[in-house]
């Protein structure tokens, strides 16, 4: 009998919680929005703030789903979250994409770690990457993987060639080829730690060997 009572109480608790949740969600959907405010997770340029502001209509909608979708479609936006208070104030939280490299031959474009292109002026101390119009997106993602992998080494520029990835580090040229970047990077670190070795070209394209040329 005691187990049955506990089971009934648990079921009632679940049903009441579900009803309260549905009522709350219904209120959130139908309750009018009286005003809004934007909270930026990170620093954003003024022109981007204006871009978001232009998407918000004078008559605020009851449902913010369409507005959320429009903001999320902006190429530089990473995440959007909405919160509507009891007083009808809609708070919009916006997180922008984080640039990993800037595109040297396409003005105003950066790349995030996922390999997505977006507009950004925040290029301080970022490595350069050179892109081509007919480039496969998968190659760009490979390049981003390599850039993230080599962040603790002062590599100035990356380029996607027909034979794979290539980068420059000061006066040195590093030919990475295609794939196997973690192992190649470990070898590069050993070469850099050996100060007696001075090479202008470090070539990883050949299987089971590294070619060093002055």
Image (cartoon, rainbow, N blue to C red):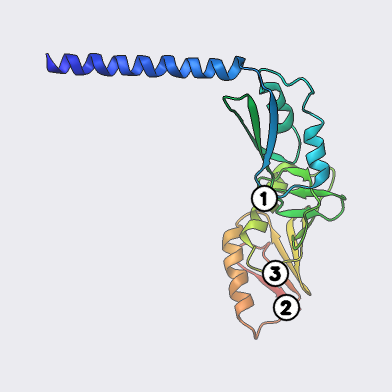
Q: Residues within 10 Å of mark 3 (few under 14, many from 20)?
A: few
Q: Are marks 2 and 1 in contact (CB under 8 Å)?
A: no
Mark positioned earlier in the residue sequence (3 or 1):
1
Q: Residue at x 66, y 68 (%)?
A: 153
Residue for badge 3: 154
Q: CA distance from mark 2 to mark 1?
A: 25 Å
Q: Residue at x 85, y 49 (%)?
A: 108
Q: Residues within 10 Å of mark 1 (few under 14, many from 20)?
A: some
Q: Residues within 10 Å of mark 2 (few under 14, many from 20)?
A: some
Q: Position of residue 113 (x, y in %)?
A: 66, 49
Mark positioned earlier in the residue sequence (2 or 3):
3
Residue for badge 2: 199
Of 92 and 86, which appears nearest the observer? Answer: 86
Which corner quadrant holds the N terminus?
top left
Which corner quadrant holds the C terminus?
bottom right
Q: Secondary structure at mark 3?
A: loop
Q: Quadrant of residue 189?
A: bottom right
Q: Secondary structure at mark 1?
A: helix
Nearer to us: label 3 or label 1:
3
Residue for badge 1: 142
């Amino acid at each position: 009998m005691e187990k049955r009572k506990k089971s009934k109480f648990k079921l009632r608790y679940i049903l009441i919680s579900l009803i309260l949740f549905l009522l709350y969600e219904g209120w959130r959907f139908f309750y009018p929005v009286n005003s809004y405010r934007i909270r930026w997770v990170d620093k954003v340029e003024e022109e981007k703030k204006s871009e978001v502001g232009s998407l918000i209509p004078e008559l605020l909608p009851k449902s913010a789903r369409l507005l959320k979708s429009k903001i999320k479609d902006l190429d530089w936006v990473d995440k959007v979250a909405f919160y509507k208070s009891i007083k009808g104030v809609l708070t919009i939280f916006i997180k922008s994409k984080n640039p990993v490299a800037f595109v040297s031959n396409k003005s105003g474009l950066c790349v995030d770690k996922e390999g997505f292109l977006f507009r950004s002026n925040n290029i301080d101390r970022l490595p350069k990457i050179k892109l081509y119009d007919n480039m496969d997106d998968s190659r760009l993602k490979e390049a981003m993987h390599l850039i993230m992998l080599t962040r603790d080494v002062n590599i100035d520029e990356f380029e996607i060639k027909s034979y794979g990835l290539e980068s420059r580090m000061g006066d040195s040229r590093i030919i990475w080829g295609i794939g196997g970047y973690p192992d190649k990077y470990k070898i590069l670190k050993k070469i850099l730690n050996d100060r007696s070795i001075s090479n202008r070209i470090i070539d990883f394209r050949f299987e089971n060997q590294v070619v060093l040329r002055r």
